Image (cartoon, rainbow, N blue to C red):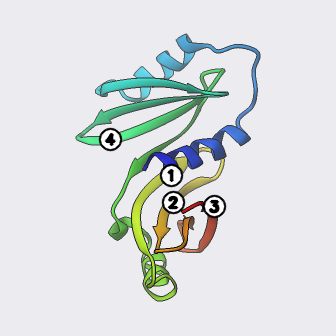
Amino acid sequence: MKKLILAAVIAISLTATAFAGTNTEKVSTSFKKAWPAASNINWKMNGMVTTISFTVDNLNMQAFYDEDGTFLGTSRAVNLTDLPAAAQTTLKEKYQDYTATEAIEMNYTATGLNYYVSMENDTKKFILQIAQDGAVKVFKKLRK
């Protein structure tokens, strides 16, 4: 799951606006306001993006903020049954020779809701990006 989430974080950081310094107070204030009931909170800086891993309502989630404290989006692990029906059909028909090893839901303020599914077989591994309408495309090819 770490590679999948890292790929999603990289995608976010490429579109985030760069600022001169970090502003952890703004990030902390924004986070506490959005998720006051969060527990198991862990912070990590990754370039221009602050990633906060946490649990809320028994869900493990991540929230992403830029250096100015602006909320960028959230991610969480999901089941394949949480994917749009059209995407589930595409996975069964087009990728029947692959195994889905993980799936995340990424709700990013700039691009909306997308899903990322890590697929692999004996020789290939890649991440699929799935839009809300069920459209499926290869997001990133990985080394096996």
Instruction: Of the two numbered discs 4 and 2 on the same chain, state the one appearing first in sequence.
Output: 4
Instruction: Of the two numbered discs 3 and 2 on the same chain, state the one appearing first in sequence.
Output: 2
- Seen at 62% across and 69% down, the residue is 138
Element under disc 2: strand
- The crowding category of the residue bearing disc 1, from other C-alpha atoms within 10 Å (few below 14, some 14 to 19, many at least 20), is some
Q: Which mark is residue 60?
A: 4
Residue at which label 1 appears: 4
Q: Is residue 10 left or right of residue 106?
A: right
Q: Position of residue 142 (x, y in %)?
A: 59, 60
Residue type of the residue flagged with mark 1: Leu
Q: Which mark is residue 116?
A: 2
- The crowding category of the residue bearing disc 3, from other C-alpha atoms within 10 Å (few below 14, some 14 to 19, many at least 20), is some
- Seen at 59% across and 60% down, the residue is 143
- The crowding category of the residue bearing disc 4, from other C-alpha atoms within 10 Å (few below 14, some 14 to 19, many at least 20), is some
- The crowding category of the residue bearing disc 2, from other C-alpha atoms within 10 Å (few below 14, some 14 to 19, many at least 20), is many
Q: Are marks 1 and 2 in contact (CB under 8 Å)?
A: yes
Counting every numbered tag in the picture gives: 4
